[in-house]
């Protein structure tokens, strides 16, 4: 007898065959109907047991969360809930469970409660659906780039450059924390540390990816990224996954086109390949919406939101235009924003970004040409001398999902910029070398993978779209 996954049993015409399936009991009712799930799909397979002919000891152990093996015949179902079911002949208890102690009861649990049980939460419909969508999205990321002529590069996780400036870093050290070697001035002597210098966990692979783009042409990274930012928000993790394409001979317009094409491609993939999970997540969201006051409800069901992205062009707006819109907006005039927009040059907070996307344009927005002062040193200076070729993509419900730029490819301009911004030229000599030996226009962006998963699943807290979230004061598991 062949073993099948629940997904295979439900999707392929195998009725009248003898089959084996293994999984975890979701529910057992009337001493007769087992709802079995093995993680291959959101759907359970119903196994109907012959109560009279099942050993009593076995019967007792068929409880929620037990791992079992079922041998039987797949038949068209008598009941209305499913097309097929298994008429079980033999049940084997593979791993018994104590249902009284098992934290995940067959009822609705809060996401907070499930977060505290992150080692078991993937056995719920919600988390298994989210994690399957996450997996499909990762595959779609590689598929898109590989089919588009990109090469996958792995940039270092431990980095020796602290000049990236994208966020607070976690130090990596093998020194004795209690009794570190000190320099004559009394500072910690990193010359004695493992790498002979101070090292940190990477906040971005961009600078290293640029070196590879200037040889391989089109590259992308997809790896873990760390930021010791103490922002306890629903959109920040201390450890997250970032996708960073970098392309030689591509300008900012090409960069915007690439980002838009990429996002549409991966969401399209998920729509096509995760239909059951998206239908479930959509329903979950609708149920949740019902508990909210009318004016806080989101008007669009999940799959419509995804379609909306697929079917519409992202609105491209310059920073300068955006500031005008914000300055004249109701919440700004009525002082409803926490940060009131007064002058050109102000950094945009997420309240402003969300106003633009959700209230003003009501579609994804690409903001470009930001003031040089509020952006990183490596972004290409425009001819106006005060803006840089930066672009951020803002998404409804999420805010910033992509941050990117055309990079400064002119040696002199870059050196000047580093001087004014206090960036160590010696340390980044290798980055400057790219501008000395065959420099070229090039661009890229960083997309936070979890923010994409948030959007695709309709979840609202970033802690719920990564298996084991790392956030301030939380590194359990
Ligand atoms: P934010 O303003 O939201 O903190 P950022 O300006 O720090 O973002 P970038 O440095 O441009 O972001 O990083 C590129 C992308 O990485 C962001 O657009 C976002 O999708 C993602 N990202 C940044 N910080 C985090 C984080 N702490 N957790 C999860 N994703 C993040
Ligand atoms: Mn940030």
Image (cartoon, rainbow, N blue to C red):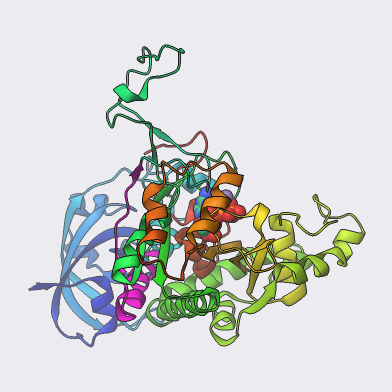
Give the quadrant of residue 272: bottom left
Which of 261 and 334 lies nearest the eye of the viewer? 261
Total numbered labels placed on residues in the image: 0
Q: Position of residue 160 (x, y in %)?
A: 36, 40
State whether residue 278 appears in this view: yes
Of residues 234 and 291, the one nearer the viewer is 234
Magenta-drawn stretch contains 142: yes
Q: Position of residue 433 (x, y in %)?
A: 37, 55
Which residue occupies the foreground of this view, 367 or 314?
Answer: 367
- Where residue 36 appears, as percent x and y from the top left, is 30, 64
The answer to which quarter of the image holds residue 53 is bottom left
Closer to the camera, 15 or 383? 383
Q: Residue furthest left?
A: 1
The residue located at (70%, 67%) in the rendering is 384
Q: Which residues are magenta?
A: 133-159
Relative to 363, residue 70 above or below: above
Q: Is residue 411 left or right of residue 48?
A: right
Residue drawn 31% across the image and 43% down it: 98
Q: Is residue 158 above or below residue 409?
A: above
Q: Looking at this rendering, what residue extends furthest in the right direction?
A: 334
Quarter in which the N terminus is drawn: bottom left
In this view of the protein, can residue 462 be seen by the observer? no
- Left-right relation of 178 to 321: left
Quadrant of ligand 1: it is: bottom right
**Residue 438 relative to residue 462: left or right:** left
Q: Residue at x 29, y 67 (%)?
A: 215
**Could you say where residue 250 lies in the image, as x and y percent from the top left?**
46, 76
């Amino acid at each position: 007898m062949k073993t099948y996954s629940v997904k295979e049993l439900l999707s392929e015409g195998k009725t009248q065959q003898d089959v084996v399936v293994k999984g975890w009991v979701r529910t057992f009712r009337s001493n007769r109907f087992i709802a079995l799930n093995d993680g291959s799909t959101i759907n359970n397979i119903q196994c109907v047991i012959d109560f009279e002919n099942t050993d009593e000891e076995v019967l007792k152990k068929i409880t929620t969360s037990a791992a079992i093996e079922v041998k039987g015949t797949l038949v068209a179902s008598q009941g209305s809930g499913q097309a097929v079911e298994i008429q079980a002949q033999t049940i084997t208890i593979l791993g018994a469970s104590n249902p009284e102690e098992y934290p995940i009861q067959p009822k609705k649990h809060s996401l907070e409660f499930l977060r505290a049980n992150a080692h078991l939460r993937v056995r719920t419909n919600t988390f298994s659906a989210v994690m399957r969508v996450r997996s499909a999205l990762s595959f779609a990321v590689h598929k898109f780039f590989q089919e588009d002529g990109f090469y996958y590069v792995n940039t270092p996780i431990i980095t020796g450059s602290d000049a990236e400036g994208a966020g607070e870093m976690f130090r990596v050290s093998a020194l004795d924390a209690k009794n570190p070697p000190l320099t004559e001035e009394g500072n910690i002597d990193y010359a004695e540390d493992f790498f002979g210098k101070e090292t940190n966990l990477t906040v971005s692979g961009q600078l290293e990816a640029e070196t590879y783009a200037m040889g391989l042409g089109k590259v992308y990274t997809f790896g873990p990224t760390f930021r010791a930012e103490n922002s306890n928000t629903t959109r920040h993790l201390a450890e997250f996954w970032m996708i960073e394409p970098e392309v030689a001979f591509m300008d900012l317009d090409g960069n915007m086109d690439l980002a838009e094409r990429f996002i549409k491609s991966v969401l399209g993939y998920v729509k096509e390949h995760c239909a059951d999970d998206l239908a479930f997540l959509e329903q979950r969201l609708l149920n949740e919406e019902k508990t909210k006051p009318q004016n806080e409800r989101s008007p669009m069901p999940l799959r419509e939101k995804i379609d909306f992205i697929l079917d519409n062009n992202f609105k491209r707006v310059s920073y300068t235009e955006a500031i005008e819109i914000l300055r004249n907006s109701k919440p700004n005039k009525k002082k409803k924003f926490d940060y009131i927009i007064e002058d050109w040059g102000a950094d945009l907070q997420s309240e402003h970004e969300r106003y633009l996307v959700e209230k003003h344009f009501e579609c994804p927005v690409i903001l470009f040409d930001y003031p040089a002062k509020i952006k990183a040193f490596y972004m290409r200076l425009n001819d106006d001398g005060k803006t840089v070729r930066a672009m951020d993509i803002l998404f409804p419900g999420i805010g910033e999902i992509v941050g990117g730029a055309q990079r400064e490819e002119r040696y002199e301009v870059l050196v000047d910029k580093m001087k004014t911004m206090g960036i160590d030229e010696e340390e980044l000599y290798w980055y400057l070398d790219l501008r000395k030996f065959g420099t070229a226009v090039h661009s890229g962006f960083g997309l936070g993978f979890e923010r994409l998963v948030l959007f695709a699943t309709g979840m609202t807290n970033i802690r719920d779209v990564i298996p084991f979230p790392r956030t301030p004061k939380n590194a359990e598991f």
